[in-house]
């Protein structure tokens, strides 16, 4: 049973990834996603950092398609997305990998953690204000060690998808990555 809040969250995520708004997520949207990350993080086109972001996006896309693209047309339709969202494995197999790719993109120094600076750079370029980015960081850094770990981030993503509480930490992600 999918609540209205969950349905809205799933719809919002679909719309975020469907960059050209044609109602399907396909390779062109993933290319646009990698380009958005590249601009947000200030990587030069053709640089190793830009190549790293492109690879992150395509690896994630390959994994996500396996669990969503049931008719093998290399695109996720809204119906396929809605069907996948009903699968108990959706969060682990689709939503978390999608979100962790964005996490790894923001982790510019590749130490497996997001510092306050890395978060600010990724998010303020993405349209978040500095204070919104600070607030999101504080919620995500649940052990308050000054870094958001992959584990903390994955936990927040799961909370975002599975919780019906609009004030849960993961809900911050809806306005961020
Ligand atoms: Ca599209
Ligand atoms: Ca399809
Ligand atoms: Ca880092
Ligand atoms: Ca932490």
Image: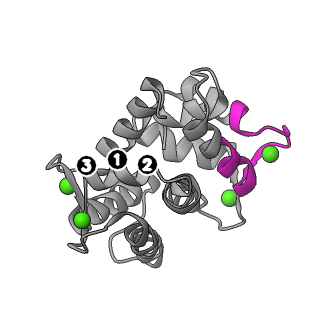
Q: Residue 14 in the image: x percent, y percent? A: 33, 46
* Residue holding disc 1: 82
Residue 78's disc is 3
Q: Residue furthest left?
A: 22
Residue drawn 79% across and 37% down? 142
Residue drawn 70% across and 56% down? 150
Q: Which residues are magenta?
A: 138-156
Q: Nearer the viewer, residue 153 or 4?
A: 4
* Residue holding disc 2: 85
Q: Disc 3, ligand 2: is the CB inside 8 Å? A: no
Q: CA distance from mark 3 to mark 2?
A: 10 Å
**Would you call the spot at circle 2 few (<14 residues within 10 Å), some (14-19), or many (20 or more)?**
many
Q: CA distance from mark 1 to mark 3?
A: 6 Å
Q: Nearer the viewer, residue 55 or 63?
A: 63
Is the C-beta separation of discs 2 and 1 under 8 Å? yes
Height in image: 152 above or below 133? below
Is the C-beta separation of discs 1 and 3 under 8 Å? yes
Q: Earlier in the sequence, mark 3 or mark 2?
A: 3
Q: Residue 129 in the image: x percent, y percent? A: 48, 27
Q: Residue furthest front?
A: 1
């Amino acid at each position: 049973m999918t609540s209205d809040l969950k349905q809205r969250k799933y719809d919002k995520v679909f719309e975020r990834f469907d960059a050209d708004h044609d109602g399907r997520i396909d390779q062109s949207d993933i290319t646009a996603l990698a380009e958005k990350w590249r601009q947000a993080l200030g990587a030069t086109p053709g640089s190793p950092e830009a190549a790293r972001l492109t690879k992150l996006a395509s690896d994630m896309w390959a994994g996500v398609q396996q669990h969503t693209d049931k008719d093998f047309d290399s695109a996720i339709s809204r119906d396929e997305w809605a069907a996948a969202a009903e699968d108990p494995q959706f969060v682990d197999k689709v939503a978390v990998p999608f979100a962790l790719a964005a996490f790894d993109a923001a982790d510019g120094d590749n130490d497996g953690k997001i510092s306050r600076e890395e978060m600010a750079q990724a998010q303020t370029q993405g349209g978040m204000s500095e204070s919104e980015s600070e607030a999101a960081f504080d919620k995500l850094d649940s052990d308050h060690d000054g870094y958001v770990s992959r584990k903390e981030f994955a936990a927040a993503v799961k909370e975002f998808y599975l919780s019906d509480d609009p004030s849960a930490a993961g809900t911050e992600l809806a306005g961020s990555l």
